[in-house]
Image (cartoon, rainbow, N blue to C red):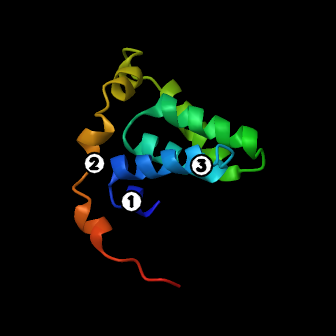
Amino acid sequence: MELAATGCYEEAMRNFDIALELRSDFPEALYSRGGVYIATGHYEEAIGNYERALKLRPDFPDAFRNREMVVERLSAVGPTGKETVVHYRDAPSLSQMTKTCSAATSYPRSRP
């Protein structure tokens, strides 16, 4: 989640995808990937990830709360009734949103 917190969305997404390939029943990875989708304006994908996380772990309050927040965002349409839908469909791709992350990932991590 460190990468997503620093705006390295594309690299964070790759890491979540790898984690889910290794272990498809990993609700925390789905939850975190949902957060990246929210940050990049891809709300339907975020909802899908939160729903998958909740199927795996029904007692996951953060996933439930985030899913409800996104659903509320999508249902809160403006005066034309289309603004929210246009917003998330026209959201930039992950690669357009991603900062240069080489500096953030090039430092060796300290070991606990």
Residue that badge 2 annotates: 98
Distance of label 3 from label 2 (alpha carbons): 24 Å
Foreground: 100 or 19? 19
Counting every numbered tag in the picture gives 3
Residue that badge 1 annotates: 3
Residue that badge 3 annotates: 22
- Amino acid at circle 3: Leu
> Outermost residue, right direction?
59
- Amino acid at circle 1: Leu
Answer yes or no: do the residues labelled 3 and 2 have beta carbons within 8 Å? no
Q: Residue drawn at (36%, 51%), measured in percent from left and top?
A: 11
Quick check: 79 left or right of 76? left
Q: Residue drawn at (35%, 77%), measured in percent from left and top?
A: 108
Image coordinates for residue 45, horizontal then vertical, percent: 50, 32
Foreground: 102 or 62? 102
Is 111 situated above or below 10? below
Quick check: 5 left or right of 26? left
Quick check: 15 left or right of 72? left
Disc nearer the start of the sequence (3/2) = 3
- Quarter of the image for residue 95 reads top left
Image coordinates for residue 93, horizontal then vertical, percent: 30, 34
Q: Residue drawn at (64%, 46%), measured in percent from left and top?
A: 63
Disc 2 residue crowd, few under 14, some 14–19, many 20+, Cα 10 Å: some
Q: Residue drawn at (30%, 75%), measured in percent from left and top?
A: 107
Disc 3 residue crowd, few under 14, some 14–19, many 20+, Cα 10 Å: few
